[in-house]
Image (tube, rainbow, N blue to C red):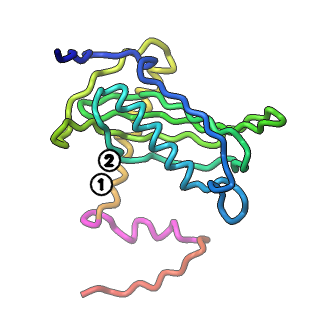
Amino acid sequence: MSETKKEFKHISESQVTITQLMLPSHSNFSGKIHGGHILNLMDQIAFACASKHSGNYCVTASVNKVDFLNPIEVGELVTLKASINFTGRTSMVVGLQVESENIRTGEKKHCNSSYFTMVAKDENGKSTPIPGIILTTKDEIRRFSRSIIRQSEGRNRSSRFSSEVFKTEDYLHLFEGSNSKITLFEQN
């Protein structure tokens, strides 16, 4: 007997939180936790949250802005929280927050926040429709709105810098005082 999927879900139905101890095997040459390890954990929790919401296998379509704000030390607990911020027809934006905690002192640090766009796939690997989300707080409405604006700005940025419309002379002023040297060769 097949279970019918919901048309809309509350955000709380698919929220995921994981906590993991950071081990020496996760560290880089300076003894801090390797950013690649944290990105891997972020991708896993984004997958879990998106799959839980959609009821399907999901793939990562894009990652928006990952800033590593504070280093994570070996021996700290890292907690990752994921929540659906936006739903489209087949895609969703998963908001992620990463926090570390020193076990001895109890000090907590916000390490980064990011947004993963995930796409639901059916058993044939084709994009498949997902449930929408039910927005119940001003913060949820703010996050949904922010995702819409971020998508629109991303499209505008991409079109402005496409090789067909980009005009070098419009941007040369940006290089004044930069750590760069332009030696422009004409191409035939």
Q: Which mark is residue 137?
A: none
Image position of 38 (left or right of 133): right
Who is closer to the viewer here, 78 or 183?
78
Kindly tell me whether residue 153 is visible in this rendering. Answer: yes
Which residue has dot 1 on it?
159
Q: Could you tell me how far apart the alpha carbons at marks 2 and 1 are, in whole angstroms?
A: 6 Å
Part of the protein shown in magenta: 163-176
> Residue drawn at (41%, 84%), measured in percent from left and top?
184
Q: Quadrant of the N terminus?
A: top left
Amino acid tagged 1:
Ser
- Measured as percent of width and height from the top left, residue 14 is found at 42, 23
> Residue drawn at (42%, 31%), measured in percent from left and top?
49
Who is closer to the viewer here, 161 or 60?
60
Who is closer to the viewer here, 63 or 157?
63
Which residue has dot 2 on it?
155
Q: Judge whether 72 appears above or below 20 on screen.
A: below
Who is closer to the viewer here, 147 or 97?
97
